[in-house]
Amino acid sequence: MSFGKLIGTIDGFLWGWPLIILLFGTHIFMTIRTGFIQKDIFKAIRMSVTKDPDAEGDVSQFGALTTALSSTIGTGNIIGVGTAIALGGPGSVLWMWLTGIFGIATKYSETLIGVKYRVKSENGTMIGGAMYALDRGLHAKWAGIIFAVLAAVCAFGIGCTVQANAVAANFTTNFGTPAIVIAVILAVLVGLVIIGGIKSITRVSEALVPFMALFYVVGCIIILIINHDVLGQAIVTIVTSAFNPQAAGGGFVGATVATACRYGFARGLFSNESGMGSAPLVASAAQTRNPKRQALVSMTGTFWDTVIICLMTGLVLVSSIIKHPSIDGLSGNGSELTSKAFSMIPYIGLPILLVGLITFAFSTILGWYYYGERCAVYLLGEKIIMPYKVLWVAGVFIGSIVELNLIWDLADLLNGLMAIPNILAVLFLSGVIAAETKKYSGSHIDDRDTTEIPVLKNSKSGVLG
């Protein structure tokens, strides 16, 4: 067996039932442990657009949220949904949606401990995330190192090269633009943004993420209006085929309940990154008076990502397939299925798809840069920041012009492995999460955390420096 096939086989196994059980099981456990924190989602949404300027942190709560969303709202929200439907049938949309509902609790939990155990670097910037929860909360520095290594490396795959490749491929396929031209332009644009650090990334994310999400959602609503005559049938098909795939009828690939569950869960978990430990890396830089406030704000990311955007994509695809059964010939290929479904909508279908894919991919490059940089700083200190920026821009350029099948599988594998130490932190610190949730409940949500944030003495050299 070749190395590429070996990686693909391991990746397929890991993103099958092992991670589904680990992540979705944690989602349900933390839903119970936090007293069904999902009930506070609308309070959290209101909180996400309010400022807490007197609190310690580098960026606003909204800035941290949009930066996190810039990485989670990506091609998985479009192509990933298509892949789930192509391989698991329309019922996979319901299972994907459920990962978003229950995943809100895990996103809340991992962010809370990421912020609670954050530290200040010697130059005054905030650093936090799963590695500090593992290091300071569980006194398991070795696990923090493992998480940081996996995140810093896989960021170049899942958040850099493959995203750049998606942008270049879209321009080349649809406009005939040479890949080398896109590579240069994209590398320059990314370099101009990341050179300014978290504040520059946050400013761009605050402007880009609401626009791209609103543009895509409005576009999907227009398509659903066009497909209104089959929308009710699409909803019924999604619900009934989640439990009886054969009920989907013509226009869909045959699947079992287990297959629908697997692909719905896997693509949903991959899309919203709840349990991956990525979002707390930027949430830890937010200006927030206590850990619960930022955890509430961060959990809205899963709501927008999966509960809203993935559901909209699923409804568009299923209704379009019902209206145009000829799309059935593309079953098994998520990318082609998505392109064909959107192309069936006159005038606006493909523009919505293209703008969505390009902006989602570009924003993911920015968000994952910060994730990777923070993990690299934890390992090697602040001296790694500039070399990491240079390597990132180079990765964007290279990713735009080469084939990346092996890199995608490898990054997908490392991304899945990231979840394991992060979920251990969430589970073993679930008592702390429950206590903090109760402590800042009700009117106490506005109380300030009086615990002094420690200054990390080795921030310039890192744990491996």
Image (cartoon, rainbow, N blue to C red):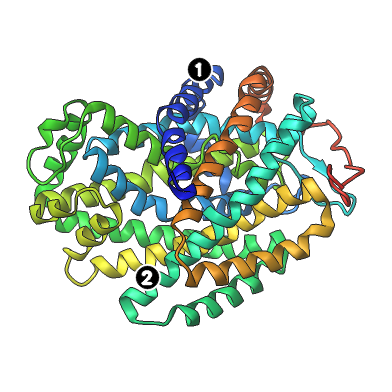
Disc on the earlier residue, 2 or 1: 1
Label 2, label 1: how many angstroms apart (C-alpha)? 43 Å
Q: Nearer the viewer, mark 2 or mark 1?
A: 2
Quadrant for residue 187, please give it: bottom right
Secondary element under disc 1, as helix, strand or loop, is helix
The residue at 12%/36% (across/down) is 248
Quadrant for residue 264, please give it: top left
- Specify the amino acid type for callout 2: Asn
Name of the residue lying farthest toward the front? 1
Pointer 1 local density, CA inside 10 Å: few below 14, some 14–19, many at least 20: some
Pointer 2 local density, CA inside 10 Å: few below 14, some 14–19, many at least 20: some
Q: Residue 5: horizontal and vertical position, in percent?
A: 43, 46
Q: Residue 8: horizontal and vertical position, in percent?
A: 43, 44
Residue of label 1: 32
Apparent side of residue 21 relative to residue 344 in the rendered image (left or right): right
Q: Residue 53: horizontal and vertical position, in percent?
A: 73, 50
Label of residue 382 in the image: none
Residue 292 visible from this viewpoint:
no
The residue at 15%/59% (across/down) is 226
Name of the residue lying farthest toward the right? 457
The residue at 83%/31% (across/down) is 450
Apparent side of residue 320 relative to residue 152 in the rendered image (left or right): left
Q: Residue 419: horizontal and vertical position, in percent?
A: 57, 35
Apparent side of residue 314 relative to residue 392 in the rendered image (left or right): left
- Specify the amino acid type for callout 1: Ile
Q: In this picture, is 303 found above or below 376? A: above
Q: Quadrant of the N terminus?
A: top left
In this view, the residue in front, 94 or 21, is 21
The residue at 87%/38% (across/down) is 454
Label of residue 170 in the image: 2
Secondary element under disc 2, as helix, strand or loop, is helix
